[in-house]
């Protein structure tokens, strides 16, 4: 009576292949376990990345170990991750210091007078003179400053006369053309002069009081809330007074 062996023989290649599959499966499971343990399902951080690297080395196929160049590349990635993390911390610290500096700067500006380029001014006390200036790009032999009320009616005209190139100041005593104090309210001040034979509007700079300051929550520019003018960027301020 003969007995037939129905068990097929396994070659060495088959054994190695099966070993590779098991090793690969074990490695995948180890990496997944390390990921869940280190991150809790959240975005990978530097600690989780290092744990994954160590797990990969522990579970690599001994018959087909990880290539040296791939290992060095992963180490370089880890080094880059560490550097980016440190850079983010430094930038966050700088941003916090900048915000603190802005807040300190803002608190010192409230209640102070600033000079900005504008044609509008709020007159709260007509007995106090208003001193402004015009910016001349060329010398002039004549020019005028016109003050109008909120309805556009001209209440006073000031003769500039002959002026040289540069910033040139003028003063309005708060009175109309009849010598009477103007009512409290908003006024418009415009200046013009003939430049090369053509009537040209001039840039006017007037004082305003800082009522409050708005700090940007996104790192933008500091905004000054001026009486009678509204918000004006700090970079637009020409002079900060007392």
Image (tube, rainbow, N blue to C red):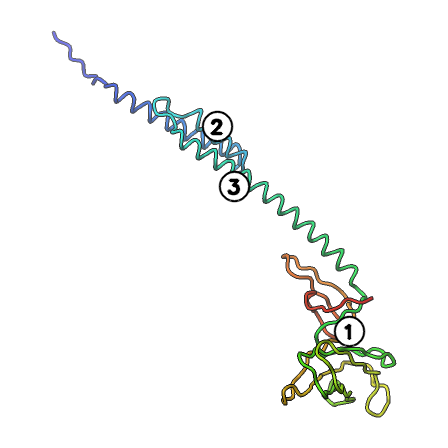
Q: Provide the residue designation for mark 3.
A: 43
In front here: 168 or 109?
Answer: 168
Element type where label 3 sits in the image: loop
CA gap, disc 2 and disc 3: 18 Å
Q: Provide the residue designation for mark 1.
A: 207
Compared to 111, does 40 lie above or below? above
The quadrant of the rendering that contains the N terminus is: top left
Residue 212 x, y percent position in the rendering: 76, 65
* Residue drawn where x is 55% and y is 38% of the image: 82
Counting residues from the start of the chain, the first of labels 1 and 3 encountered is 3
For the residues carrying marks 2 and 3, which lies nearer the camera in this image? Answer: 2
Q: Residue furthest right?
A: 127
Residue 73 x, y percent position in the rendering: 44, 35
Counting residues from the start of the chain, the first of labels 2 and 1 encountered is 2
The answer, for residue 81, to whether it is visible in the render is yes
In front here: 117 or 9?
Answer: 117
The quadrant of the rendering that contains the C terminus is: bottom right
């Amino acid at each position: 009576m003969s007995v037939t062996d129905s068990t097929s023989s396994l070659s060495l290649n088959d054994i190695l292949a099966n070993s590779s599959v098991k090793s690969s499966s074990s490695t995948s499971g180890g990496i997944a376990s390390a990921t869940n343990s280190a991150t809790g399902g959240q975005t990978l951080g530097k600690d989780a990345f290092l744990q994954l690297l160590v797990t990969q080395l522990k579970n690599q196929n001994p018959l087909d170990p990880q290539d040296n160049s791939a290992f060095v590349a992963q180490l370089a990635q880890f080094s880059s991750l560490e550097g980016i993390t440190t850079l983010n911390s430094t930038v966050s610290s700088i941003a916090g210091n900048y915000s603190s500096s802005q807040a300190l700067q803002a608190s010192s500006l409230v209640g102070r007078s600033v000079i900005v380029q504008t044609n509008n001014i709020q007159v709260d006390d007509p007995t106090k003179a208003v001193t402004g200036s015009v910016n001349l790009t060329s010398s002039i032999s004549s020019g005028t400053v016109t003050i109008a009320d909120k309805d556009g009616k001209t209440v006073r005209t000031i003769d500039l006369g002959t002026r040289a190139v540069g910033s040139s100041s003028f003063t309005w005593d708060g009175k109309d053309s009849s010598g009477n104090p103007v009512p409290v309210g908003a006024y418009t001040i415009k200046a013009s002069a003939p430049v090369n034979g053509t009537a040209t509007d001039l840039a006017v700079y007037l004082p305003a009081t800082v009522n409050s300051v708005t700090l940007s929550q996104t790192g933008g520019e500091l905004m000054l809330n001026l009486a009678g003018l509204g918000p004006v960027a700090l970079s637009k301020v020409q002079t900060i007074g007392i």
